[in-house]
């Protein structure tokens, strides 16, 4: 990876930590599915040149995870969660 990719990754990590309010948030980049589990986040990073659209998607995922880390209340979420179907899937997204 070139220096610009490393600078970009550090910018994403810093932004996620600032938005989430968690300076210990562990962020990794790699292939596969994005996830947020506790204080660990994984952001997919293509191995080839990143298009403008892929870059926007990556930033959107990072921001979504940071906001979820900061504001999500699991107890409240489970109490208000629809019990089945597409409503549940959308609610959990």
Image (spheres, rainbow, N blue to C red):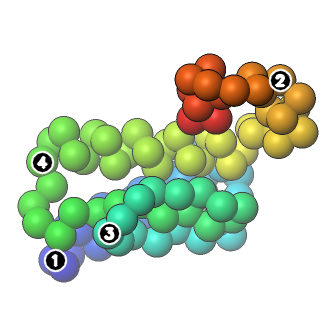
According to the picture, the residue beneath numbered tag 3 turns out to be 31
Return the residue found at the far bottom: 1
10 Å neighbourhood of mark 1: few (<14), some, or many (≥20)? few
10 Å neighbourhood of mark 2: few (<14), some, or many (≥20)? few
Q: Residue at x 19, y 39 (%)?
A: 53
CA distance separating discs 3 and 2: 33 Å
Asked whether 64 or 87 is in front, the reply is 87
First in sequence: mark 2 or mark 4?
4
Asked whether 89 or 65 is in front, the reply is 89
CA distance separating discs 4 and 1: 16 Å
Q: Are marks 1 and 3 in contact (CB under 8 Å)?
A: no
Return the residue found at the far front: 84
Q: Residue at x 83, y 23 (%)?
A: 80
Q: Which image quarter: residue 11?
A: bottom left
First in sequence: mark 3 or mark 4?
3
Q: Nearer the viewer, mark 1 or mark 2?
A: 2
According to the picture, the residue beneath numbered tag 1 turns out to be 2
Q: Nearer the viewer, mark 2 or mark 4?
A: 2
According to the picture, the residue beneath numbered tag 2 turns out to be 80
10 Å neighbourhood of mark 3: few (<14), some, or many (≥20)? few
How far across and down, in percent of the image, does residue 74 sit?
82, 42
């Amino acid at each position: 990876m070139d220096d610009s990719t490393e600078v970009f990754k550090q910018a994403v990590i810093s932004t996620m930590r600032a938005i989430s309010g968690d300076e210990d948030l562990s962020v990794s980049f790699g292939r596969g599915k994005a996830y947020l589990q506790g204080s660990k986040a994984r952001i997919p990073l293509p191995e080839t040149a990143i298009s403008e659209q892929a870059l926007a998607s990556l930033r959107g995922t990072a921001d979504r995870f940071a906001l979820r880390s900061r504001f999500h209340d699991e107890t409240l979420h489970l109490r208000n969660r629809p019990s089945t179907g597409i409503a549940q899937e959308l609610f959990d997204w």
